[in-house]
Image (tube, grey):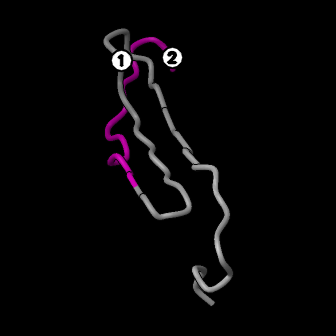
Amino acid sequence: MPAGYKPEAVPAPVQLRTAFGGYEAQTQVLPDGSVQYTRRLPMPAGRFEAKEYEA
């Protein structure tokens, strides 16, 4: 981000979890003024029956 600029707002953190895995995302403004976007997509190993999925 150019010197002297600051974000007016950042998105709210997101956290979703299901039996099939999860999703997390967050945005932070660091002390030096830079913006850090972090996301995770944890997916556990496993096998799932077709009936476990929504149609």
Q: Please give the range of residues in magenta.
A: 1-15
Q: Residues within 10 Å of mark 2 (few under 14, many from 20)?
A: few
Q: Residue at x 51, y 20 (%)?
A: 1
Give above or below for 8 relative to 33. below
Q: Secondary structure at mark 2?
A: loop
In front: 18, or 34? 18
Identified by mark 2, the residue type is: Pro
Residue 42's x, y, as percent?
Answer: 55, 45
Residue 28's x, y, as percent?
Answer: 36, 29
Give above or below for 19 relative to 38. below
Give the quarter of the image for residue 41: top right
Identified by mark 1, the residue type is: Leu
| Residue at the limit of the structure toward the bottom, as seen here | 55
Residue receiving disc 2:
2
Give above or below for 29 relative to 39. above
> Along the horizontal axis of the image, is 19 left or right of 54?
left
Magenta stretch: helix, strand or loop mostly: loop
Q: CA distance from mark 1 to mark 2?
A: 14 Å
Residue 30, disc: 1
Residue 40's x, y, as percent?
Answer: 52, 40
Residue 7 belongs to the span the image colors magenta: yes
Q: Secondary structure at mark 1?
A: loop
